[in-house]
Image: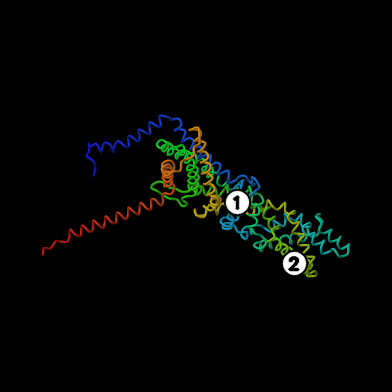
Amino acid sequence: MIPPPFSRERVVIESIPSRIFEFGVQRFASDWKSYCAIPIIAGFVGWFTNYLAVQMIFYPIKWRGLPIYKVEGEPFGLLGWQGIIPAKTLKMSEAMVNTTVNELLTMEEIIQRLDPDVVSRILLPQSGLIVRPFVDELLADRPKFLSNFVTDYTSDTNRGMIKQRFAEKFLRDLTADVQENINTICSLRHCVVGKMCSDRSLLGRLFQISGKDELLFLVDSGLYLGFALGLIQLVISLYFDNPWTLSLGGLIVGLATNWLALKWIFEPVNPLRIGPFSFQGLFLRRQNEVSADFSKFFAEQVLTSRQLWKSMLTDPTTLPEWEKLIANRFATFTSEVTLGAVNLKLKSRKLKAASARVCATLFDYLEDLHDYVDQALEIDQTLRARMMAMTSVQFERVLHPIFEEDEMTLILSGGALGFAAGLVQQYLITGSISIPVLSFGGLLKRILLPAASSIAGVFALSVALRPKKQIIKLTERTRQLRRRTQRYLNGSRRKKRIPSTKV
């Protein structure tokens, strides 16, 4: 029953909000400096916790702490910390190869861009030194004059016969063999992962360059979100005289700012239109720019000619295949130039030993080749074009894995830092740090109610973050109501059209 317009009961009911508001204004005026400091400190807490969280992703490169207990492949120990990316370089680089590199590059495709004639001309001055181990091994038990004669013609002087007449053919055919057997003599996964693990700062720098804007947003958003949540915290402090609302608010600010910022970077994955506005994750909006940065760094720092050849000639899974390939090429070459007079057995112990020596020293003679290989393979251009053509769902997997690995760690660390900052804030405002009374009434009034109010504020912000589900629910309810209304109106019309009959 609604009270009459001028009844005493109605006046009392209508005065409750004004009395609550008046009480809050009086409390604020009594110590406005302290209350104004609450959202300012909350903004700083949000910024500082996000800043530390970003630093904890990348640093320190090596584990720092007391060597009491450390989990290999994890950033934390009993008393210490290692950057999340340096600690999980192996796992993350393998994930990057599987989700990005293998989908965009194949060695079988890009190795075909090498011109065997150009390769043979570049390596021609080193050809005698390259095959020298074969001469040393195969002629070791031959007469000395024969060994000296062949050695003279395989030296790195301009009068060497192999260099003048046969070296180009040998090098050209060897290049063709490499192109034909690239899948067995090269592991793209081992090449990339090996490079990343040899320098654990490399993967972090790749993500810092590719996601520079998103990392900056992650830090700066802590200031804005922290200030907004601090306003809610201020209102709570006006009506709940408990200093623990400050430390509890710091906990919530630390948790919420990290969580909201991470969500806004990658969600929604696909563009979501709401009227004239379009929403999409910040990282996904910069697909073209990120593609250019990622590809350039990857081609110049990771998948270079030096790293490619070094991996192929040292990787235990590919080195035996290289030794077989070079032994087979030299045996075939020898048979061709001698018109079949010399037929080396592929299973010969000396041929295997010579081939192993060639592989052990081959990388040293490829220095002049690297510039041409880097230019000819066009890894930068290929990666860039194909990353730009990726769907939003595919592109999201380029950077998101580094946050997914320890997303909860980042959020909880933000909460812990925020809680500590809240204790400091409590001390600065009240001059002491109090312990809450955990009776039911005290727990309800001093902790649960402020926490519920702050969480409600976080939920209100999260609605703006992921509006799609809310809009879908609202739209579906509207449609249901419209259908029910239409059925009701249609039923009423039919009843009116049917004439009533009297019995």
Q: Residue furthest front?
A: 439
Query: Is residue 501 at all visible to an observer of this figure?
Result: yes
Front residue (pair 154, 195): 195
Q: Residue 185 location, x and y as percent? A: 67, 61
Residue 332 is labelled as 2
Identify the residue at horizontal 75%, vertical 53% (top origin): 364
Reading the image, the residue beneath label 1 is: 74
Front residue (pair 449, 196): 449
Residue 492 is left or right of residue 313, and the answer is: left
Identify the residue at horizontal 26%, vertical 58% (top origin): 487
Q: How far is disc 2 from disc 1 in space, using C-alphas?
A: 51 Å
Q: Amino acid at mark 2?
A: Thr
Asked which secondary structure carries label 2, the reply is helix
Asked which secondary structure carries label 1, the reply is loop
Query: Is residue 296 at all visible to an observer of this figure?
Result: no
Q: Residues within 10 Å of mark 1 (few under 14, many from 20)?
A: some
Residue 52 is labelled as none
Which dot, 2 or 1, sits closer to the camera?
A: 1
> Where the N terminus falls, by quadrant?
top left
